[in-house]
Image: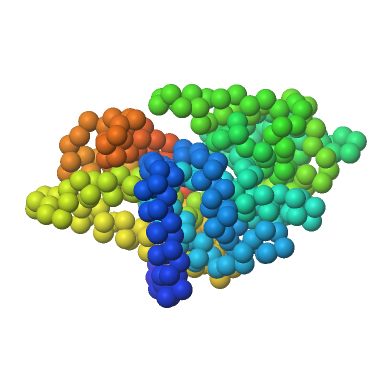
Amino acid sequence: MATGGFRFPKIEYTQELKDLQAEVRHFLADERASGGFTPVADGWAFGVDLEFSRKLGAKGWLGMTWPKQYGGHERSSMERYVVTEELLAAGAPVSAHWVADRQSGPMLLKNGTEAQKLEILPRIAAGECYFAIGMSEPDSGSDLASLRTTATKVDGGYKINGRKIWSSGAHFCHYMIATVRTGGARDDKNRHEGLSQFLVDLKGPGIEIRGIRNMAGDVHFNETVFDDAFVPEDCLLGEEGEGWHQVTSELGLERSGPERFLSSAITLTEAARRIGPTPDDAQALGLGRVTARLKAMRRMSLGVSALLQEGESPTVEAALVKDLGTAFESTLLNDIRQLLPTEPIGQSSDAFARTMAEGLLRVPSSTIRGGTNEVLRGIVARQLGLR
């Protein structure tokens, strides 16, 4: 599938992939039945369960594509996609390890020192080491190139000063990959230059993590403050000044997965379970429409995974999937409520009411995670030659 300069290769599941899919489904069914987890909407962003993350590590379902010498399992991108999709569809609580497995680990694998790889990557693959994202800043919005946090060269390393915001899970994470300014000025016409990335130990001196309470009463987001926070020289990831190229590559990893349209899929599953095998005409039509859109999104997302497996960097395709996925998730819950009017009740024993409440509270943030829709559409527009 290719259109307007985009390419989404068609993927057919092999028998090996189907067997893996069945294995993951069996594991999840057993875990849910035994009380190992309670399904949650947006489980990849808000479902923190350290023990569940360790269980996935023990199954070999984290660090799946990484070299075995670093704790990985040398499996394919498609095998990883199968596991990821099943976890999301089941509403599994996978937030603790999510960033580390999805993007920080691969960035460390590409740019870290050998000692860092040997020390940190096996812990990520075991579900025991967690990362926060250090991109967004106060007053910068989605304009990442305007960031003001600086890293100044000192004897033996760098001192970092500034603030990062929306640092999901930073209060329990071990590390952050922070994008900061090592040269240039934020108002220069070449402001994309002079950016660098650092591996930061969040337990180090000069770092304060301040929780941000959301409308649901949860402390999930954080503001991370750096006050002369010292990091050794070997914590510079890649080359100094190459941070913009590295961070855009990282954003490709962040935007390309099925979490961009499956965050609230558990609510659809619970609604279908509530409706049962004999829907009325309106329910059958509504479920059919939603399912058709879901299948189209899945088809595109699988294409992005195929491009990654080919060694491509599908930045534009990932942006398109993320934009369309955000639109899908924004309308999904309202579509379901038209079919099954209900009062969303948090902490309810009724799975449908509970996941609906979680989804309604959390879905607004999907429009900014990984870049706002406006930024993503600008990326797509450039590919089409419209700007």
Write the residue at 36% across / 48% down.
33
On the picture, is 318 further left or further right than 311?
left
The quarter of the rendered structure image containing the N terminus is bottom left
Residue furthest right in the image: 155
Q: Residue 145: x, y in percent?
A: 62, 40
Say which of 348 and 175 sits in front: 348
On the picture, is 304 further left or further right than 193?
left
Residue furthest bottom in the image: 15
Write the residue at 34% across / 30% down.
347
Relative height, residue 133 to residue 83 (above, below): above
Q: Residue 60: x, y in percent?
A: 57, 59
Asked which quadrant contains residue 196, the reply is top right
Relative height, residue 216 to residue 338 (above, below): above
Say which of 236 and 74 sits in front: 74
Write the residue at 58% across / 53% down.
57
Write the residue at 68% across / 64% down.
68
Relative height, residue 293 to residue 51 (above, below): below
